[in-house]
Image (cartoon, grey):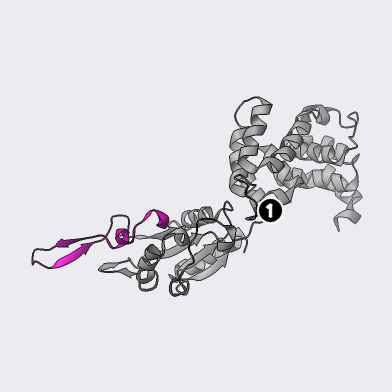
Amino acid sequence: MKPTHISTALAQLIEIRQPTFIWGPPGIGKSQVVRQTAERMGLELTDIRAILLDPVDLRGIPKIDDNGTPTWCAPSFLPRSGEGILFLDELNSAPPLVQAACYQLVLDRKLGEYTLPDGWSILAAGNREQDRAVTHRMPSALANRFVHIDFSVDQEEWLNWAMENKLAPEVISFIRFRPKLLHDFDPARADKAFPSPRSWEFVSGIMGSEMDFSLLSELVAGTVGKGAAAEFCGYVKIRHQLPHPDTILSNPTGVEIPTDPAVIFALCEMLAVAAGSRHADALITFASRLPDEFSVLLIREAVRENNSLVETTGFARWAEAHADVLV
């Protein structure tokens, strides 16, 4: 299920207080989609890392009340009032005894003498067993207490998120060029680093710092793996050797069109980010010189960055000339 679909589904399941478990490989944003859903619904989020707990931590410690009766003091991290989401992250990474301690909490919304407030819902997340992460097989009795959702990576949704959060343009354009490298995780490989939505976000942060290119390539390799890093750094090197966008927009008929498709792709992505509505005529002029597939790529990405381009007369002329390709 795509992230937006998961977020919509979670909102409905939260309304009916249905416990839900999100499954997926490492680094794809399971925890993030839960946080975003909580923010969108205006709910408090209590994030409990089950792997850090001992079985007795959830029950609390005993005390003797004024009548001499032993009672249990529930831990402070369990909510007492209000509305929110109790998020049991990495639940299936926790030891079996910790998972067993969650049975009553998940199904009955109780834990000994503690009762989860009516305004709270329970969500959980974890890696799949085939991912060879640190996991323990979830007992069937606990698994049967959840609705289970499989999280899948979606390139377009990630790209939209990356642009909204202003990730490095080199990272965004590279993923458009090599979408299969957004998430390339094979549990059979022994790689410490591999491409994932989370690791590309790390790469974006690294790109924001000024450092020697050779050092940069080593850090990228340590973030997304050597293979993906070699492709990315080669792409970045090509991108940085291209004419400045202002040079192209000031003389759209005089700039030589590259012959290498990878170079044209990098040029289109770079130009799309830089062009505004005031550059519409120059952008259309340059796009008209490109092969049809790259012309469409350039205008599509430019409109994605600046939707006002569709209101210009230049866009109307270009759309009419490329009507057969756009259909």
Tell me: 158 left or right of 283: left
> Percent x, y for residue 209?
59, 29
Per the rendered image, the range of residues in magenta is 49-78
Point 63% across, 45% down: residue: 162
Q: Is residue 250 visible?
A: yes
Q: Is residue 273 left or right of residue 8?
A: right
Q: Is residue 157 left or right of residue 20?
A: right
* Residue identifier under label 1: 155
- Few, some or many C-alpha atoms within 10 Å of disc 1 (few <14, some 14-19, many ≥20)? some
Q: Is residue 66 magenta?
A: yes
Q: Quadrant of the N terminus?
A: bottom right
Depth check: 105 or 187 in front?
187
Residue at point 87% right, 37% down? 286
Q: Amino acid at mark 1?
A: Gln
Q: Residue at x 28, y 55 (%)?
A: 76
> Looking at the rendering, in which quadrant would you find the C terminus?
bottom right
> On the image, which quarter does residue 43 sit in?
bottom left
Instruction: Say which of 247 and 242 sits in front.
Output: 242
Toward the viewer: 32 or 93? 93
Residue 239, placed above or below residue 66: above
The percent position of residue 211, horizontal first and vertical second, equals 62, 25
Residue 287 is covered by the magenta coloring:
no
- In the figure, 7 relative to 192: above or below? below
Q: Position of residue 255 (x, y in %)?
A: 88, 29
Q: How many marks?
A: 1
